[in-house]
Amino acid sequence: MKGNVAGVLLGYDWQSRRAEGLRTGWLMARYMRCGCIRLLPGLVRLDEAIGTVRKYDYYMSNIAVYPAWRGKRVGGALMFHAEAVARQRGLRSISLDVEVQNAGAINWYNRLGFRVARETVVALGGRSFRFYRMSMPLK
Ligand SMILES: CC(C)(COP(=O)(O)OP(=O)(O)OC[C@H]1O[C@@H](n2cnc3c(N)ncnc32)[C@H](O)[C@@H]1OP(=O)(O)O)[C@@H](O)C(=O)NCCC(=O)NCCS
């Protein structure tokens, strides 16, 4: 906004995810070395539980707007762009995973047309994390 970064959205389809997944694994192994090996089982579990991308899905991995810009339609504009990209690629829905405690974001997604498809619990580092998988069909 006016030359400043106001927010970010990271999204991809299953083909990009497969390509980037290999590259991410390689970069982690290169920069984290032993630390990466220790974290690996947990990361694999997390990856299997959330973040799966179906062939007709556009998966929204992250969306965030800087606090100063929230409520000014930046998130809405990012989402509108994601929908346009997904349609252009012939995809049928947008999906995401959100922590169940993130009531603000869940309300926001509901208002945009997303609905909870399932709940997932992931154990990581002695803690458990609960996520909703939410999806919105593209008309
Ligand atoms: C969720 C988020 C991306 C929304 O972006 P935003 O730019 O603030 O949203 P918009 O301005 O486009 O939203 C427009 C409408 O949603 C409402 N809204 C925005 N954030 C909301 C929230 N947290 N809870 C309830 N309503 C919200 C606004 O009041 C506005 O309502 P209106 O149409 O009646 O005026 C932003 O609040 C954010 O970055 N949150 C923290 C990061 C996060 O939780 N990301 C999701 C992780 S899965």
Image: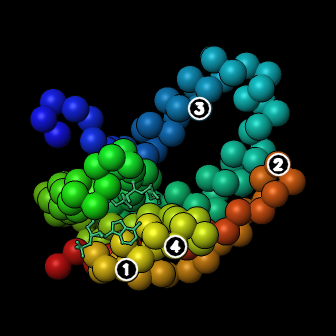
Above or below, 39 relative to 51: above
Which of the 4 quarters of the picture holds residue 111? bottom left
User: Secondary structure under badge 1?
Assistant: helix
Task: From the top left corner, tell me how far across and down residue 53 is, in percent.
Answer: 45, 60
How much space separates mark 1 and mark 3, taking CA atoms?
A: 33 Å
First reached walking from the N terminus: tag 4 or tag 1: 4
Camera-near label (4 vs 3) is 4
How much space separates mark 2 and mark 4, taking CA atoms?
A: 24 Å
Any atom of ligand 1 within 8 Å of the CB at mark 4? yes
Q: Amino acid at mark 2?
A: Gly
User: Secondary structure under badge 3?
Assistant: helix
Which of the 4 quarters of the picture holds residue 84? bottom left
Which residue, given by chain and number where applicable, does mark 3 sit on?
25
- Tell me which residue sits at (78%, 30%) in the image: 37
Which residue, given by chain and number where applicable, does mark 2 sit on?
125
Which residue, given by chain and number where applicable, does mark 1 sit on?
110
Camera-near label (2 vs 3) is 2
Badge 1 local density, few (<14 within 10 Å), some, or many (20+)? some
- Tell me which residue sits at (22%, 57%) in the image: 72
Which residue, given by chain and number where applicable, does mark 4 sit on?
103
How much space separates mark 4 and mark 1, taking CA atoms?
A: 10 Å
First reached walking from the N terminus: tag 4 or tag 3: 3
- Nearer to us in this view, 78 or 2: 2
